[in-house]
Image: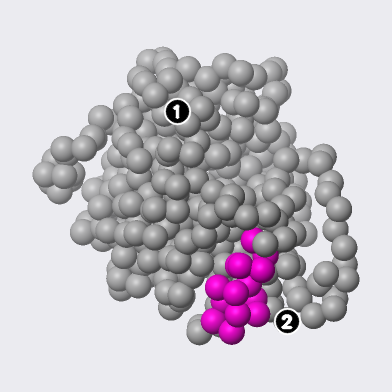
Amino acid sequence: MRALAYFGKGDIHFTKDLEEPRITTDDELLIDIIFCGICGTDLHEYTDGPIFFPSDGHKHEISNNELPQAMGHEMAGIVREVGSGVTQFKVGDHVSVEPTGTCRDRYRWPEAPGVNKEKCAACKRGMYNVCSHLGLIGNGVQSGGFAERVVINESHCYKLPNHIPMEVVALVQPIAVSWHAVRVSKFKPGSSVLILGGGPIGLSTILALNGHGCTEIVVSEPAKIRRDLAEKMGAVVYDPMQHSYEENIKYLRALAPDKDGFDYCFDCSGTPATLRSSIECLTFRGTAVNVAMWATGKPIDFFPMDITQQEKSYTGSMCYTHHDFEGVIDALEKGTIDPEKAQHMITAKVPLERGFEDAMMRLITHKEETIKVLLTPNNFGELDSERLAKL
């Protein structure tokens, strides 16, 4: 089948010859991919990888799968075929996919050496989002959504009503990342919030907060196009490039309702400056959450008394669980997350054939001018709303 695939270090290209997926266990679905978003993780696999993908000549620890594999894990699709044991889905259902690969998925690959391996401590406790062997569909465990079709077990799939645009279904996964971060923060309605970074996850965090009843949000972001989008999505915006670091902290703290810092800060950038800002912009007993993925092996200075003196908290958020996908979908159905507002995040839709040059490289070289680019594996583009409505 047609796919944009990872063949090895520095080698991502379009192919017509990737092996077709097929149902091999009775709880699996075969899904036609309508849209699949490009994530920063995908870009890092090209610039810095392999990270999640197995290195050349090796196989994945969970699945025993090797390269090449179709990339892509932000999937929106339509069920094409169901296994004999599937109970929750039927052909024609619109679905989002939770793309984690963990200890709980080993049974899908009975020929893999680790199929009978004991579950890690996190998976035993139901915290599979921090599995010791955590991987992603489309990033090493198995081929993902930069392809015409994908097979995945039904416990990873979530049905959405047909009135939710398929473009928005492709945003459920990144919004779930932010939904989990809001849950981890133990957010309380009526609290003040600062988001540091207005990229895809920063904008997704606006939506996740909306879904939790929060509409008073400040976003600090240097790129004008991203500030403009955050403003369209209802946030107050701030340009951190207009002042020195020390002055930025003063001005940001003053944007909180009591002018003395925020109850919650979400770091969606992952730089030394934003980590420090996320703590210094808190009020007393405030909570800072790191949502960003940091480069490994690059420690930074951290001063515990910056937290201790005002009993602040600092924590991290990793991936998502089924609770987060269910929460996002429920919020979309109820309208507390506005699908039209979510669509502001989508910069372009690009066919698979041009996915590397016109999508991935565009995101790498013109980062400040793009937010979310969707690939269209089955050639559903800008004018296909009537065609999609018939499916």
Asked whether residue 272 is in view, the answer is: yes
Q: Nearer the viewer, mark 2 or mark 1?
A: 2
Picture quadrant of residue 21 = top left
Q: Residue 12, how many percent across, how many down?
A: 52, 20
Camera-side residue: 40 or 279?
Answer: 279
Residue in the picture at 57% in, 67% down: 194
Q: Residue 293, how many percent across, how many down?
A: 66, 47
Identify the amino acid type marked 2.
Answer: Phe
Residue in the picture at 48% in, 25% down: 361
SS at circle 1: helix
Judging from the image, the colouring scheme is: one colour
Quarter of the picture containing the C terminus is top left
Q: Is residue 170 above or below residue 50?
A: below
Residue 225 numbered mark, or none: none
Identify the amino acid type marked 1.
Answer: Arg
Query: For mark 2, does the 10 Å Cα neighbourhood hold few (<14), some (14 to 19), or many (20 or more) residues?
Result: some
Which residue carries the number 1 mark?
A: 362
Camera-side residue: 164 or 54?
Answer: 164
Camera-side residue: 170 or 212?
Answer: 212
Which residue carries the number 2 mark?
A: 284
Residue in the picture at 38% in, 49% down: 345
What range is drawn magenta here?
A: 248-263
**Left-right relation of 229 to 254:** left
Q: Is residue 126 magenta?
A: no
**Left-right relation of 329 to 50:** left
Q: Is residue 254 magenta?
A: yes
**Left-right relation of 334 to 182:** left
Question: Of marks 2 and 1, which one's residue comes earlier in the chain?
Answer: 2
